[in-house]
Amino acid sequence: MHKLWASTYKELLLLSRDIGGVAILFVMPMVLIITVTLIQDSTFKTIADTNIPILLVNNDNGEVSKTIEKGLETANAFKMVLDKTEEEAKELVYKGTYQLAIVIPENLSADLERKVNQNVNSIIAKIGLEEATTDTVAIPNKEVRLYFDPATQQSFKASVKNGIDKMVSKIETESIYKAFQKQITDDPSEVIFETENFITFKEIVAKNGDQEILPNSVQHNVPAWTLFAIFFIIVPLSINIVKEKSQGTFVRLRTNPVSYATVLAGKTLVYLVVCIIQFVLMLLVGLFVFPEIGLPTLDVSGRLPLLLLVTVFTGLAAIGLGLLLGTIATTQEQSAPFGATLVVILAALGGVWVPVFIMPEIMQVLSNISPMNWGLNAYLDIFLRNTSVVEILPEISLLFLFFITTTLIAIVYNEKKNAV
Amino acid sequence: MINIEQISKKYKMAESYSVKDLDLFIAENEIFGLLGPNGAGKTTLISMLCSLIKPTSGSFTINGLTYKKNKNQLKQLIGIVPQEYALYPTLTAFENLKYFGSMYGLKGKELDHQIYEKLDQLGLLAFANKKIETFSGGMKRRVNLIASILHDPKVLFLDEPTVGVDVQSKNVIIDFLQSLNAKGTTIIYTSHHLNEAELFCTQVAIIDQGTLIVKGKPKALIDKFDSAKNLEDVFLSLTGKGLRDSA
C-alpha cells in the first residue's frame, strides 16, 4: 500500500509540475464544450435567425412568385438578392459566393391558374353543375430550379427543399380552393373552404411519471463532449508512460521490487481524479457559463450522484486504454497521434457526432464496441430519461470490464516483454 | 557471490551473440571492473544480472538466488546505477530519492534521514530541493547513484557511472563507492576509464565480442604482460587498436 501511495504522490507531483499540461487537460475541454454547444445551438436556430444570403431569380412576377418571396422573407432565414439573371445566379452559386439560388419559371402564376381552372372546370362538369368546356389545352409542368453550392451540406439542402416544397404545395392547394370558390359563388369574401391545415403536429416530450424532461442542445452536448474530453486523457497518460521509458526511470523501476500493476495503479488514481475534475468543470460551465452566453442552463437536479458514478467508470475505461497504449507504444510519436485518432474514431463510433440510429447497419453494430457509446448511453439515460442506477448498471459494468481488460493486457504485455 | 555459468545473449534480428558462453565468478566484497571496447557485451551482461533482459541461454545466481525463484528478494538485494540519468527531471532531488526509496519499502523519517545523509556525503545537500532538470551532468550522476543505494544493497551494479562528469565529481563518486565497499557492498562496474579502473578495482575482467578474455587483479594483469606499463596497455594488447564501430 505504501508503494501505491508513493507512486500516486509521484504522479501528482509530475502532473502539478507541468502547468501547461494541466491547463490543456482542464481548459481545453471547457473551450471545446462551449464552442461545440454554441455551434450546435445556433444550428437549431439557423433557419430562424441567421439570414443566409440567397439569390431569387423571379421570372414569373405573378401571385405565386410573390407568395414564395413573401414566404422566404417571413421565414427570417434568408436575405434575398433579386437582381440577377439565371445564368449569373448559377455562376455565383457555383463559385461559392451564394449557397443557394432559386429560379422561378416564367408564367408560373398564370399557368398554375390556368391549369387549376381547367381541372376544376372539368370536375364541375363531371358532377353536372356546369357544361363541359371543350377548349382544354395542354399546359406543361413547371419547374422551380434550385442551384446549390457544391459545398453545401446535405442537411441544409434537404431543409431548404422541404421548405420550398411545402410552400409550393400550399400555393397549389390554395389555388384549387380559390378556383372552386369562383365556380361556386360570385362573392369572393364568402368563406366556403377553410384553408388552414386540418392536420397539425404537436411535439410531446416523453415523461417519466410527473417529471417532464426537456431536452435541449446543452443536455445533449454536455454528456457527449464531456465524454470526448475524458477519453482524450489517453494522450497525456500514454505520453507519461512512454516518457518514463525514454528518460530511463522505467528501467530503474523494473529493477525495483515493485510490480507494474502498482505503478499503473498510481497513475490510475491520479488520472481518475483528473477525469472527475474535468467533469465537474464541465458541469460548472453548463450551470454558470452557458446561461451567461445565451445558452440553456444544464439541469443536473437530483442526478449528480449517478452522473459522478458514470464519470468514474468512464474515466476508468479511458485510463485503461491509455495505460495499454502507453505500455505498447515505444515513442511519443507513436502514442500521441494514435491516441488522438483513436479517440476520434471511438467518438464517431460511439455516437458523439452522429446519433447511432442513423448510422449504417454495420456501424451501428460496431458502435456497440465503443466504450464511448456505453458512457454516452449512460449519461443520456441520466440526463434525459431520469433513470436509476439499476438501469445504467449494464453500461457501467461494461466500462469497468473494459478497464480491467485493457489494464490486464497492459500488465501481461509488460510481463511478457520484460520476462527474465 | 555472483556465479555466472555459460551465459549467452543474442538479440532478435542480431547477426551475432552479444554475450557468448560466458563463465564468471565474482566474490563477495569485490570492486569488480567489467572492461571492454564498445559493443563488447558489458552492458548486456549487467542488464542480464539486473533482470532487465533475459539470457538466451545459461544461468547465474546472486548470493545463491535466482530471479525465477526469488525475484523480489533478489531485487531487494541489488542496486543498479544505469548509464542514463534514470530520474524525473521535473521533480527535486529529494522527491526523486523519496520515491525510489519508497519502492524498496523504505518510509518515514528513516528514509528522509538516509536521503539527507547520502546527499550530504555526495555534496548535494544544498540542492536537495532543486529540480533535477537544473542540475549539471555530474550532479545528476550523483543523484542517480544515491537513488540506487538508499536500501543498502549487498551488490551494486554501475554502468559507466563516471561518464561525462568532471574530475571533481568523479573523485567524489569513486570515494563514495569505496566507502560503500568498505561497509560490505560488492561493486560491479563497467567503464572505459582504464586508469580509473586500475586504481579503483580489486578485480577486473576484460571481455570482447561477448566472451571473457582475461580476469584478474589489475596489478597481476599488468605484470603478466612484459611490455605493459598500465591496464590500458594490457587492454590494447588483448583487444587490438582497431575501431569497434557498429550499427
Image (cartoon, rainbow, N blue to C red):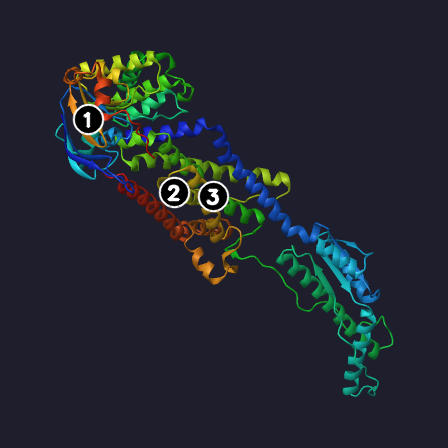
Find residue B234 and report its image quarter: top left
Q: Chain of mark 2?
A: A
Binning the other alpha carbons within 10 Å of mark 1 as few (below 14), some (14 to 19) or many (20 upward) gives some
Q: Chain of mark 3?
A: A
Please identify the residue farthest to the front as the structure is shown: B227
In the rendered image, which quarter contains the C terminus of chain B? top left
**Where residue B49 sits in the image (x, y, percent)?**
21, 31
For residue A340, which numbered disc appears in the image?
3
Binning the other alpha carbons within 10 Å of mark 3 as few (below 14), some (14 to 19) or many (20 upward) gives some
Q: Is residue A69 visible?
A: no
Above or below, comparing residue A138 to residue A232 in the picture: below
Residue that badge 2 annotates: A325
Asked whether the residues under the numbered discs 1 and 2 touch, taking CB atoms below 8 Å apart as contact, a structural biologist would say: no
Dots 3 and 2 on the same chain:
yes
Above or below, comparing residue B236 to residue A122 in the picture: above
For residue B77, which numbered disc appears in the image?
1
Disc 3 residue type (three-letter): Ala
For residue A235, which numbered disc appears in the image?
none
Residue at image point 69% right, 62% down: A163
Binning the other alpha carbons within 10 Å of mark 2 as few (below 14), some (14 to 19) or many (20 upward) gives many
Disc 2 residue type (three-letter): Leu
Residue at image point 23% right, 26% down: B239
Residue at image point 84% right, 77% down: A185
